[in-house]
C-alpha cells in the first residue's frame, strides 16, 4: 500500500497587531483551498499562526496579553477553517498560544501545535520544549523576545503519533535547532516531523548570526532529517511584522537531507511535496539503524 503523504507547508506572511483572527483565517482558507486543488493530505501552518508574534512586546501585567491566547481549539474564529478542512478531507497542523487554568485557578500559558487528521479528529497537541529568549524586559533591544515570560516549557518532551499512515512528530521553532529534538523522535520511529517557526532575522545577543539565519535554518532541519531518516516540514511566518523582519524560507526536507520544495516569497505561499514515507526506511534500516550502530553505552551526558 502506498504511503505517499502529500504535504503542504502553508507559509504565512506577516500578521499585524491590527489583524483580527477572522482576517488571518480568511488567508488560511485561501491556502487550504489551494492545497485541496493540489490533492494535499495535510496542511501545516506556522507557530503562533493566528496572531502577531506578541512576545516582541513587554507588558507589566501578563494578563494584559491574554487576548493573544486561545481557550479552546477549534473555536468560533477558527471554525470556518476546520469546516473547510473536513469538507476537503485535509488534515491540519496549527500553531497557537494556549491558555489553560488548573483546578486551583493557576493560569497556564503554552506555545502549542495541534495536529488533526483528515476526518477532523485531534491526533495530539504538542507543547514547545525549548523556550528561547528572555524572562524580563530588556529595553535596550530593538524588540523583545519574551517567550520565557509568556510561555512555560513543556514537561512532556517529544511525542510521535500514528497518523497519515505513518509516524508523525511535532516540534516548534527553536526546537528545530536542537539535535535532541530529532533524536528523541527518531528513537520513536518518526517519519514526518512538522515544525512551525517565527525567526526574526535580527538576533540581538549576537548580530553576527543575522546573515546566517537562512543557512542555520536549512542546516539544522536538513541534518535532523538525514540523521534520523525522516521528512521534516519547516513552516514560517515570515516577512516584516510590526517592523520586525522574519525569515521565510519554508522548506520540506527528505530523509536524505535534500530539499524537496522551498518557498520563493516571504508572504502567504504554499510549498508542496509528495512525501513517500517508505523512503525513511532506506536510512533507518542502513546507515542509521539505531539498534545496530548507536553506542548509547559509551555516550556521556
Ligand atoms: N520563535 C522562536 O523560537 N524563535 C527563535 C529565535 C528567538 C532564535 C528561533 O530559534 O528561531
Image (spheres, rainbow, N blue to C red):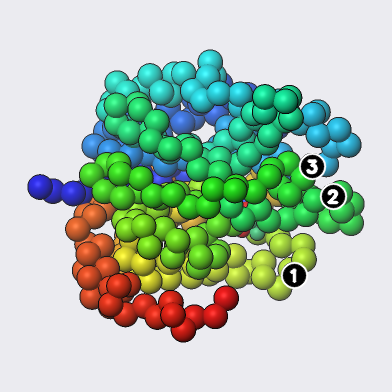
Spot occupied by residue 176 in the image (x, y as percentages of width and height): 52, 59
Q: Residues within 10 Å of mark 2 (few under 14, many from 20)?
A: some
- Decide if residue 88 is on the left or right side of residue 241: left
Q: Residue at coordinates 33% horizontally, 33% vertically from top-left?
A: 117
In the image, residue 207 sits, relative to residue 22, either above or below, namely below
Q: Considering depth in this image, is 45 or 177 the residue closer to the camera?
A: 177
- Decide if residue 242 is on the left or right side of residue 74: right
Name the residue furthest top: 76
Question: Mark 2 — residue?
Answer: 136
Q: Considering depth in this image, is 196 or 191 the residue closer to the camera?
A: 191
Answer with mark 2 or mark 1, whichever residue precedes in sequence.
2
Answer with mark 2 or mark 3, whichever residue precedes in sequence.
3
Q: Quadrant of the C terminus?
A: bottom right
Spot occupied by residue 258 in the image (x, y as percentages of width and height): 34, 68
Res. 206 mark: 1
Spot occupied by residue 55 in the image (x, y as percentages of width and height): 73, 43
Q: Are marks 2 and 3 in contact (CB under 8 Å)?
A: no
Res. 57 mark: 3
Instruction: Single out the mark in the foreground, 2 or 3.
Output: 2
Q: Residue at coordinates 22% horizontally, 54% vertically from top-left?
A: 276
Amino acid at each position: 500500500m502506498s504511503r505517499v503523504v502529500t504535504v503542504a507547508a502553508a507559509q504565512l506572511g506577516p500578521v499585524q497587531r491590527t489583524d483580527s483572527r477572522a482576517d488571518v483565517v480568511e488567508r488560511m482558507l485561501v491556502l487550504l483551498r489551494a492545497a485541496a486543488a493540489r490533492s494535499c493530505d495535510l496542511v501545516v501552518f506556522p507557530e503562533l499562526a493566528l496572531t502577531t508574534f506578541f512576545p516582541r512586546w513587554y507588558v507589566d501585567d501578563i494578563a494584559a496579553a491574554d487576548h493573544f491566547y486561545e481557550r479552546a481549539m477549534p473555536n468560533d474564529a477558527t471554525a470556518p477553517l476546520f469546516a473547510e478542512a473536513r469538507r476537503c478531507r485535509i488534515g491540519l497542523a496549527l500553531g497557537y498560544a494556549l491558555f489553560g487554568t488548573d483546578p486551583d485557578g493557576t493560569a497556564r500559558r503554552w506555545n502549542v501545535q495541534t495536529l488533526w487528521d483528515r476526518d477532523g479528529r485531534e491526533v495530539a497537541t504538542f507543547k514547545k520544549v525549548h523556550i528561547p529568549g528572555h524572562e524580563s524586559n530588556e529595553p535596550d533591544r530593538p524588540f523583545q523576545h519574551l517567550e520565557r515570560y509568556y510561555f512555560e516549557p513543556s514537561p512532556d518532551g517529544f511525542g510521535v503519533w500514528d497518523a497519515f499512515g505513518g509516524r508523525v512528530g511535532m516540534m516548534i521553532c527553536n526546537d528545530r535547532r536542537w539535535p535532541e529534538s530529532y533524536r528523541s523522535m527518531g528513537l520513536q520511529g518518526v517519519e514526518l516531523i512538522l515544525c512551525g517557526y517565527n525567526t526574526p532575522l535580527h538576533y540581538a545577543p549576537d548580530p553576527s548570526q543575522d546573515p546566517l539565519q537562512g543557512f542555520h535554518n536549512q542546516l539544522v532541519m536538513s541534518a535532523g532529517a538525514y540523521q534520523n531518516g525522516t521528512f521534516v516540514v519547516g513552516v514560517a511566518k515570515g516577512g516584516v511584522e510590526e517592523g520586525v523582519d522574519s525569515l521565510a524560507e519554508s522548506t520540506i526536507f527528505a530523509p536524505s537531507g535534500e530539499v524537496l520544495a522551498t518557498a520563493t516569497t516571504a508572504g502567504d505561499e504554499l510549498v508542496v511535496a509528495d512525501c513517500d514515507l517508505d523512503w525513511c526506511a532506506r536510512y533507518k534500516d542502513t546507515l542509521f539503524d539505531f539498534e545496530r550502530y548507536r553506542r548509547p553505552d559509551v555516550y556521556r551526558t
